[in-house]
Image (tube, rainbow, N blue to C red):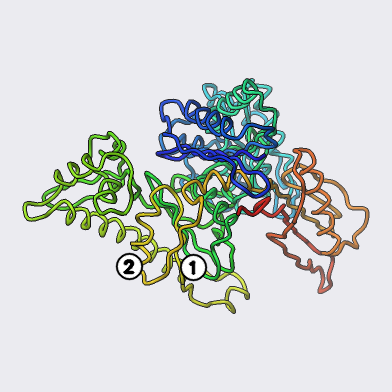
Amino acid sequence: MLLGIDVGGTFTDAVIVFQGKVLAKTKTATTHEDLLQGIFSAIDTVMREAPGTIERVALSTTVVTNSLVEGKTDPVGLLVIPGPGLNIESLLPAKAVVLSGYIDHRGREAAKMINEEIAEACKTFADKHCFAVSGKFAVRNAAQEMTVSREIIARTGTEHVTVASQIAGSLNFLRRTNSAYFNAAVWRRFSWFAAAVEGALFARGVNAPVHILKADGGTMPLALAKCQPVEAIFTGPAASVLGIMAIGTAEGETISLDIGGTTTDIALWRGGSPLFAEQGAAVSGYPTAVRAFWLRSVGIGGDSWVRRSSGKLLIGPERVGPAMAAGGTEPTVADALIVAGLVDFGSRAAAYQALEKLALPDQTPEQAAQEILDGAAENICTAVREMLAAHQARPVYTVTDMVNTKTFTPHAIVGVGGTAEGLAPLVARRMGVACQIPDNGAVANALGAAVARATTDITVRVDTERQVLSVAELGLQEKLPSRGMTIAAVRQLAEKYLSERSGRFGIIPGEVETIYEEEFNLVRGFQTAGKIITCRKQVKPGVLTDVH
């Protein structure tokens, strides 16, 4: 049996899936003051309904995202080795110490480190618990990053150092540096959370592997997540995408709406697959190398606070509590849905009181409800239209992009989440497309977490002229036996190292895909002197089983 848990802004959901069927499901209030309390309440409920042996536990958690949004992170000692060129200091999320020395674009040490600078940086950051180190071309030779990391540990006794090249093996110094910084910033908080989850599951007799959902829709074992918690940002939206994938309702060009209690998460689908962010996710406005689905969130959900200011109706993005129908003190979108007869829960009389509180002198509660729902649906439609416009205006990087310039034209909306049944059809009607509300859609996020496939990736780079092979994520650099390396051989090497890395963390390789590949010649004296070949492969994100 597979146990999936999703911690949302309003509800914590849990499901147990066995052989493609949902055996048990629950939706409980998220306990923001103590997330673990709500998580274990959900676990206890579904395990009572479907007792048996749990084979795997997968969590979609807001711990990392909330830590960043709420500023509950550790200050980080950030050290960068940029070498000559563009100064990125003003683009980073924190003040960095710049170190001398650098690796050039071929992976050669062009200037040595100065130990005194590292020692001085350690003094500057003496009050920091965690550190991050990033070198511009460290993905082609991580030796200087590793030297700095060892010096920091020796001089400060720090709990953790994030080495940027091991977080992301691709080029883009800025994105990689930001990823390393945020990884270090949330490391202690996530480590505490992971230890608490392991302990509580053990106390319940659950000895199954524990996985954390990633932003790209895969999962990673908790042991790997402890090293790379930044990968666990935006797991809620990713979970809904995986849930829809498991249910199999997104065909052709489709828009999915995950309408929960606090937000609506929007994703675009083509040919049954979600679209990805071209370069990586942004965290607190800073670009990172974290691979993620292309998603957009808007602050509209069932518990969105509704009020009037100077006669103007305001809907969200704040949430001040549950609907008045569910015992809250302020009107919400859910109260309007109840009065409009689109959903049925809680106290209908309290929902009417909420709408009477908001209604204008010449309005009935039903008319006020319709005004609220029209406004909420239009806010979501506006975000969808902006997303479609951004897709059409996206930069063109490859010949394939130039050839495939077809406009994204959605024919349907798939609605999941607790509020989708009432709100998604209104959005679809305004956009003139069909609407689908799948079975188990209310717990699609937990379902997606339960059946998400475990993934990892690897980047192999070969310089045949220098006869050097490097694997950034492993901090590996070694000599090639010969210069005669082809791109086909590099692909095989990438699959070999990917298999080794997967095995280290208990991941079954399964379907492997190439997510980046390039080959170009090195010319000396008008003759080809060698090649530089790069291949990045990953265990393809997806679902372990369809859910019927």
What's the residue type where badge 2 is placed? Answer: Arg
Residue 527 image point, x, y percent: 84, 72
Mark identifier at residue 75: none
Label 2: few (<14), some (14–19) or many (≥20) C-alpha neighbours in 10 Å:
few
Q: Residue at x 54, y 48 (%)?
A: 239
**For this rendering, which residue is in front, 99 or 425?**
425
Count of numbered badges drawn on the protein: 2
Residue 241 image point, x, y percent: 54, 54
Query: Toward which corner of the image does residue 135 lie, by quadrant?
Result: top right
> As drawn, which residue projects farthest toward the left?
361
| Between marks 1 and 2 in the image, the one whose residue lies nearer the viewer | 2
Residue 270 image point, x, y percent: 55, 68
Residue 84 vs 4, above or below: the answer is below
Residue 52 vs 259, above or below: the answer is above
Label 1: few (<14), some (14–19) or many (≥20) C-alpha neighbours in 10 Å:
few
Q: Is residue 400 left or right of residue 514?
A: left
Q: Residue at x 38, y 58 (%)?
A: 424
Secondary element at image label 1:
loop
Residue 102 image point, x, y percent: 67, 45
What's the residue type where badge 1 is placed? Answer: Arg
Label 1 – label 2 distance at C-alpha: 25 Å
> What is the quadrant of the C terminus in the image?
bottom right
Mark identifier at residue 394: 1
Q: Which residue is mark 2?
A: 430
Residue 152 vs 17, above or below: the answer is above
**For this rendering, which residue is in front, 532 or 419?**
419
Query: Quick one: label 1 or label 2, which is nearer the N terminus?
Result: 1
Secondary element at image label 2:
helix
Residue 287 visible here: no
> What is the quadrant of the N terminus in the image?
top right
Q: Residue at x 52, y 21 (%)?
A: 127
**For this rendering, which residue is in front, 273 or 101?**
273
